[in-house]
Amino acid sequence: MGLGNGLQNKQVVILGGSSGIGLAVAELAATQGAKVVIVSSNAERIQKAVECIRSEAQGQAVDVSDERAVASFFATLGSFDHLVFTAGDSLHLHDLATTDLQQARRAFELRYWAALAAVKYGSPHIRKEGSIVLTTGIASQRPQKGWVMAASVCGTIEALTRALAVELAPIRVNAVSPGVVRTNLWQTMSASERERLYESVGNSLPVGRVGEAPEIAQAYLFLMQEGFATGQTVVVDGGTVLV
Ligand SMILES: NC(=O)c1ccc[n+]([C@@H]2O[C@H](COP(=O)([O-])OP(=O)(O)OC[C@H]3O[C@@H](n4cnc5c(N)ncnc54)[C@H](OP(=O)(O)O)[C@@H]3O)[C@@H](O)[C@H]2O)c1
């Protein structure tokens, strides 16, 4: 057995690949010879992302919160090697006292239920020695006040990762847990609020700054290529859990 499987000519499907961490994974995988397929809900953003990647890349618009659309996407796609799930929408951040519990359920729609649908319909098409990499976040281990829903979703994804690693073996299933990363996830804030967040979080961390998407992408590439980790969550958080 060689060390790692490499990504040359492997097909990597990235749900949530039109921006942020997913796009960085697509760009890095493509530089290593992978054929990438990026999916997001917006055709225009996908087109722009495919142009950014500048090597063999395809894109498709699918709303991954629509189970039937996910099933039909994978049925048409056929076999591939690695599934990466980075789709995410804006965070539900409220104190519990003011949380509308019906609305709060939506926090699970994309990050949990859509991820589960992607794995359910995608995993039967994963080739031998392929893998799945999901996305969680450091809020599970270091929640802030107001982060009850976001932290709950992250903890759920970590448990799901371990359960899927057993359920789907020998397909390896892992997750990446980023700290705060400069991406469009924070675009609902004004530019000045966002910069203040990056600065205050960055200053509180051992590394002295928030993360950049290409740094987080390296963890996904590691998990796809090495052949022995499964059921694990790799933390790339600038030291958030230490402070
Ligand atoms: N950035 C951070 O600080 C941070 C920290 C911890 C964890 N994370 C997690 O990392 C993941 C990626 O986030 P990011 O920071 O890279 O955010 P991002 O730049 O906003 O990327 C989110 C991606 O999800 C796609 N998406 C959203 N709704 C979708 C839908 N219904 N169907 C298909 N695709 C959809 C978006 O594309 P369209 O809008 O075109 O659909 C986009 O490609 C998320 O789960 C996030 O919670 C991020």
Image: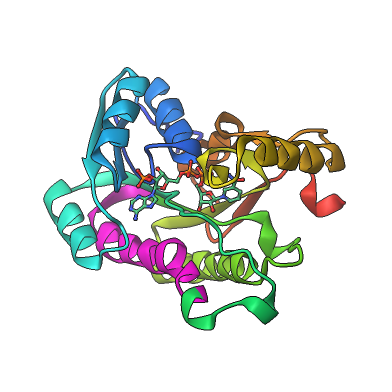
Q: Residue at x 38, y 40 (%)?
A: 17
Residue 131 appears at what percent x and percent y? 40, 50
Q: Main secondary structure of the magenta part?
A: helix
In this picture, residue 33 sits left or right of residue 240: left
Query: Residue 235 colored magenta?
Result: no
Above or below residue 139? Residue 223 is: above
Q: Which residues are magenta?
A: 104-130
Residue 216 location, quadrant:
top right
* The N terminus, quarter of image: top left
Above or below residue 36? Residue 164 is: below
In the foreground, 29 or 131: 29
Residue 76 appears at what percent x and percent y? 12, 50
Residue 32 appears at what percent x and percent y? 41, 23
Residue 93 location, quadrant:
bottom right
Taking the view exactly as shown, the residue that stands out farthest to the left is 76
In the foreground, 3 or 140: 140
Query: Residue 124 colored magenta?
Result: yes
- Count of numbered badges drawn on the protein: 0
Q: Residue at x 56, y 64 (%)?
A: 92
